[in-house]
Structures are given as structure tokens and as C-alpha cells.
Image: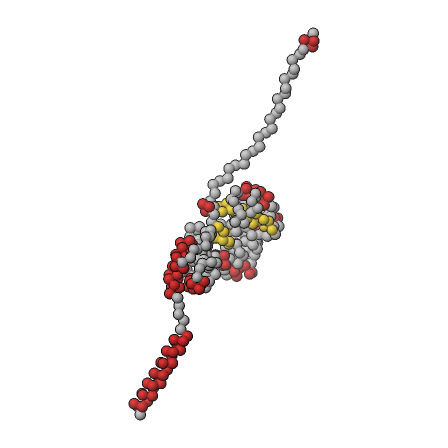
Amino acid sequence: MILTAVLVLGIIGAIFAVVLYFVAQKFKVVEDPLIDEIAEVLPGANCGGCGKAGCRALAEAFVKQGNMDGLKCPAGGDAVAQKVAALLGCTPEASEPQVAVLRCNGSCANATAKNKYDGLKDCAFANSVYAGESGCVFGCLGLGNCAKACQFGALSIDPNTGLPKVDDEKCTACGACVKACPRGLIELRNKGLKNRRVYVACRNKEKGAAARKSCSAACIGCGKCEKACPFGAIKVENNLAYIDFTLCKMCRKCVAECPTGAIHAVNFPPLPPKKEAAPAATPTPAPAPAATPAQQN
């Protein structure tokens, strides 16, 4: 009986093994080995800046599409793009390097604290229940969600200003900090020639007096910058100026015109002082005509 039981179990096991083999063969997924090659080239940070779930998901998208159109790895930059393009046998799209920029000027000096927040140290939570220590509902809360989201150590809270500080060299423009800020204060902008940029460091849409009440360096929507820009790069809407970095030629005329200092020019030499208009010259009286002989007599 024991031998019979062992034999029956052996036969049943063999039948199941055969069935499982054929099922596995029918439903097996053959993965392109190129996916592994591209995944090894990618940074492996899984930051989500590409819009995919992670680096492997991006690698799969590259292989499925067969080219790089509309797909890129912000964290890897041009160096990774060239390697991926070589594996795919295509030419990568040319793109300007970008960097994260904080569009808030509400430092401890510019936005005086009117109260003290003593709740959960989380920007998303604080934004839902709290205006901010200066009373500006558009300003940075300074609780560091952006710094926590950055996997490259490019963001930190400056203890002197209370605002996030971006390290241009470490920033990969992955966009994680952009998603982490509940007030939309961080923007990806082109690094610019010689790492120079001009932008409005404010998102306050209140009218001038109310904006200045919360922050002395707020944009007041006066429109002087828009009138001064010869390239049409600045638009004022809802009491707030915005500089289109694709149109800006970085002449800095807007910087000189801004009455509150809300426009920041990064990595530029100092502007030359304005030349004062020379006083009008006093006209020299014309000499009297010489007397004629008749007049002399």
C-alpha cells in the first residue's frame, strides 16, 4: 500500500509538472535585454522627474518607443542622454540644462514674522491650516518639504533667510522639489549662459499695498518691468509679473526698474550706476555789435 501511494503521488506530481511547464511556456514574457542595458546607464535615483514610476519604467518606455522623442532623464542630463541614444541607435533631442529656482523673496528680513507656527513640520499640512508667519498666503513656509524630496542634496533651508537654498552644481532638475512644494514656489528654469538667470522671486497676487504689508520685497504689479523690457518677455497678470525665460535676453533693464527688488538677477556682475543728467548749460550772451562811426559821433 505504501508503494502504491508513493507511485500515485509520483504520477500526480509528474502530471502537474508537465502542466505547469506548458502553462509557463504559454504565458512567459520575453523581455528585451536592451531594457537592462539602458537601466544600467540611468542614474537609478527613481526620482520620477521623467514622469515614469522609476528608472526601469523609463528604460522600458525607451525600448518600447524605440527612440527618445518626448522622453528624457532630467537627473542624468546630456551625458546619460548620449549613452541611451547610442544604445537605441538614435539622436537625442537637444535641450537646455535647467535648474530649480525659488520664486519667493520672503526672507526673515523681508517678511517679518507676525506669529509663530508650532504645528506639524510639514509644508503640505501647514499650508492647509496656516497662512504663514508673515501672513503671506503665497509665500514659502520654510518647513523643508522640498529639501526632503531632493535625493541629490541640492536643497537645504538657509538658517539666515529661512528659505530653501538651491545648489546649482548638485541640482539635476528632476522636479521632485517642484512637486513637493504645496504653494508652487519652485520652478524649473533654463540655467542660462554662464549660469545667469533673471526671474521674479514672488508669487503674491494681492494688490500692491497688501503684498507689501506681508513682504517688503513683494511684486506689486506696477508694470514698470513690463514697460522696460524691449523683448516682450515680461507680462503682468493678476498683480504679478512673470518673466518668460525663453524670451528673456537678460539685459536686466527690468531689474533696474523694479521698485521693490522682487526681480532677481543671478550670477551677474553689478549693474553700472545710473548716469545723472548733466545740468543745462547757461547760454553765453552774444557780444554787443561794434558801434558805427555815426553812432560814435
Q: Residue furthest left?
A: 3
**Residue drawn 44% across and 59% down?**
67
Near-viewer residue (149 or 93): 93
Q: Which residue: 40% across, 64% down? A: 35
Q: Give the answer, above or below, for where 73 lies relative to 287.
A: below
Q: Is residue 7 left or right of residue 261?
A: left
Residue 168's place in the image compared with 129, above or below, is: above
Residue 208: image location, x then y, percent: 61, 48
Q: Residue furthest bottom?
A: 1
Horizontal side, residue 223 vs residue 265: left or right:
right
Is residue 47 in view? no
Residue 139, position as x, y percentages in the image = 54, 53
Task: Name, please, the residue furthest toward the front.
Answer: 89
Q: Position of residue 93 (x, y in %)?
A: 45, 54
Image quadrant holding the N terminus, namely bottom left
Q: Name the quarter where the C terminus is drawn.
A: top right
Along the viewing direction, whichever of 197 and 258 lies nearer the viewer:
197
Q: Is residue 145 left or right of residue 229?
A: left
Q: Residue at x 52, y 44 (%)?
A: 249
Give above or below for 70 relative to 29. above
The reply to whether residue 138 is in sight is yes
Q: Nearer the viewer, residue 18 or 6?
A: 18
Q: Nearer the viewer, residue 14 or 241?
A: 14
Quadrant of the rendered structure where residue 75 is? bottom left
Q: Colour scheme used in the picture?
A: secondary structure
| Numbered-mark total | 0
Identity of the residue drawn at 54% across and 57% down: 183
Q: Residue 4: percent from the left, percent from the top? A: 31, 90
